């Protein structure tokens, strides 16, 4: 009977794993699978996954999970797809995930155009290539007849991008299927090999709306104007001295309001994005934002007091991504560094906003990795991906998963 129960100190080291014939067999699969992975990439990318409408791609991934023999394939209430590759026991429980959604709205042409090595299509690198590697990982483990001590969960999440506000992963970890008992979480997001994201870049988004009675630009001149007030608020907000360390940023990304050049608007609004490695800095910026809007509205109201009209405002939080950090000396980060190095990749520790924000903020060891390959023009219609070095990304993932889940020898 093979009954290998790896305690921390008994685990095979990453370099020992590299010498295992099982791992080598998985690597052979990866070396030979190039064409199949390219085909999978095109199939995934050409199945649209607009924000909040990931169903078609989710169904495709569920079907693929079934076809490759993963266990208990299912979708949860939020739309995430979950499957399992059972181990000898249920612990440790390792989750490998990739997000399904793209930033592109419904109706975007997602057909893939090939130019030599290059694949051109919106969403091809963020995150069709991540989904491809998620599927390929399960296939490589099977090809190597790799059996693990613990269970590996394969998860395709919804709502990672923008307005999705991490809704998929948030649901999984707060009330959903990953609410307890997750020992490690790996998110596969985008290309590249060097980046190991272990710090979660926190962000908050706000919608600020200023309202007044509105009127005619000539006939009602003298009443309060929401656009004028908002303009003042933006001017003040944009002068905030954001610290370089901890790195902090802010952006007024959208302004809206008004209907005609000769009408005093009834309404003006802006959407603001605030980010920082430190949640304290985000709190400070939120306080500052509220204050500048208050001041701007008060100024407009007092300047136009003779008219008897007043503005009101509303500041609503429309997005929240918590910050945090998986320690550099944690098993998952050390193993990710080591599995990169044995494959000749010198990794770089990184801070970013990804699906891992949620587990990290809850104290679950989590990292986000690129899957290899190169890309450009991400989040634009001219997005492209070249799978150069994808094999290394996949091999690293096999090593890391086998290490964390415990290879049964
Ligand atoms: Zn992404």
Image (spheres, rainbow, N blue to C red):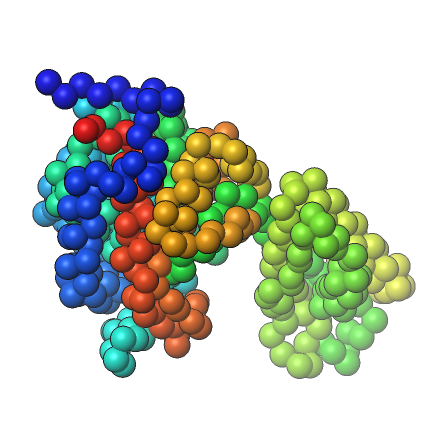
- The x and y percentages for residue 393 are 33, 54
Picture layout, residue 314 above or below residue 192: above
Please state if 357 lies on the left or on the right of 133 as rendered: right
Please state if 262 lies on the left or on the right of 82 as rendered: right
- Between 210 and 213, the residue placed more toward the observer is 210
Please state if 165 lies on the left or on the right of 230 as rendered: left
Residue drawn at (65%, 63%) of the image: 252
Labels in figure, total: 0
Residue drawn at (31%, 55%) of the image: 392
Q: Which quadrant would residue 309 be assigned to in this image?
A: bottom right
Residue drawn at (38%, 33%) of the image: 184
- Residue 102: tell me if it is visible: no
Quadrant for the N terminus, please. Answer: top left
- The x and y percentages for residue 42 are 22, 67
Residue drawn at (71%, 61%) of the image: 212
- Between 230 and 323, the residue placed more toward the observer is 323
- Between 11 and 405, the residue placed more toward the observer is 11
- Residue 137: tell me if it is visible: yes
Quadrant for the C terminus, please. Answer: top left
- Between 62 and 402, the residue placed more toward the observer is 402
Picture layout, residue 265 above or below residue 358: below
Picture layout, residue 150 above or below residue 243: above
- The x and y percentages for residue 80 are 30, 43
- The x and y percentages for residue 41 are 23, 63
């Amino acid at each position: 009977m093979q009954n290998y129960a790896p305690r921390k100190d008994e685990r095979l080291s990453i370099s020992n794993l590299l010498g295992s014939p099982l791992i080598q067999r998985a690597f052979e699969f990866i070396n030979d699978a190039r064409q199949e992975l390219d085909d999978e990439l095109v199939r995934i990318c050409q199945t649209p996954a607009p924000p909040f409408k990931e169903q078609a791609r989710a169904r495709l991934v569920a079907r693929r999970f079934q076809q490759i023999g993963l266990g208990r394939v299912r979708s949860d209430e939020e739309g995430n797809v979950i499957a399992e590759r059972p181990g000898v026991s249920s612990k440790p429980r390792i989750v490998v995930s990739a997000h399904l959604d793209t930033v592109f709205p419904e109706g975007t042409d997602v057909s893939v155009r090939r130019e030599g090595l290059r694949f051109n299509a919106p969403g091809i690198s963020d995150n069709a290539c991540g989904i491809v590697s998620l599927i390929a990982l399960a296939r490589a483990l099977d090809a190597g007849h790799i059996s693990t001590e613990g269970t590996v969960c394969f998860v395709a999440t919804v709502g990672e991008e923008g307005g999705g506000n991490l809704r998929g992963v948030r649901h999984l970890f707060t009330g959903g299927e990953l609410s307890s008992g997750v020992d490690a979480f790996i998110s596969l997001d985008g290309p590249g090999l060097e980046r190991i994201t272990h710090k979660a870049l926190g962000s908050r988004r706000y919608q600020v709306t200023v309202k007044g009675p509105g009127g005619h630009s000539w006939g009602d001149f003298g009443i309060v104007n929401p656009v004028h007030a908002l303009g003042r608020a933006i001017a003040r907000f944009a002068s905030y001295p954001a610290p370089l360390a901890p790195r902090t940023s802010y952006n007024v990304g959208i302004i809206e309001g008004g209907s005609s050049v000769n009408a005093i608007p009834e309404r003006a609004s802006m959407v603001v994005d605030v980010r920082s490695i430190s949640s304290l800095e985000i709190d400070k910026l939120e306080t500052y934002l509220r204050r500048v809007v208050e001041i701007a509205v008060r100024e407009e109201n007092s300047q136009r007091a003779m008219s008897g009209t007043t503005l009101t405002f509303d500041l609503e939080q429309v997005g929240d991504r918590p910050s945090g950090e998986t320690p550099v000396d944690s098993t998952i980060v050390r193993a990710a560094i080591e599995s990169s190095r044995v494959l000749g990749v010198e990794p770089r520790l990184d801070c970013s906003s990804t699906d891992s924000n949620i587990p990290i903020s809850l104290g679950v060891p989590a990292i986000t990795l690129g899957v290899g390959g190169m890309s450009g023009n991400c989040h634009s219609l001219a997005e492209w991906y070249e799978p150069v070095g994808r094999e290394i990304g996949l091999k690293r993932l096999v090593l890391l998963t086998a290490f964390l889940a415990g290879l049964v020898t």
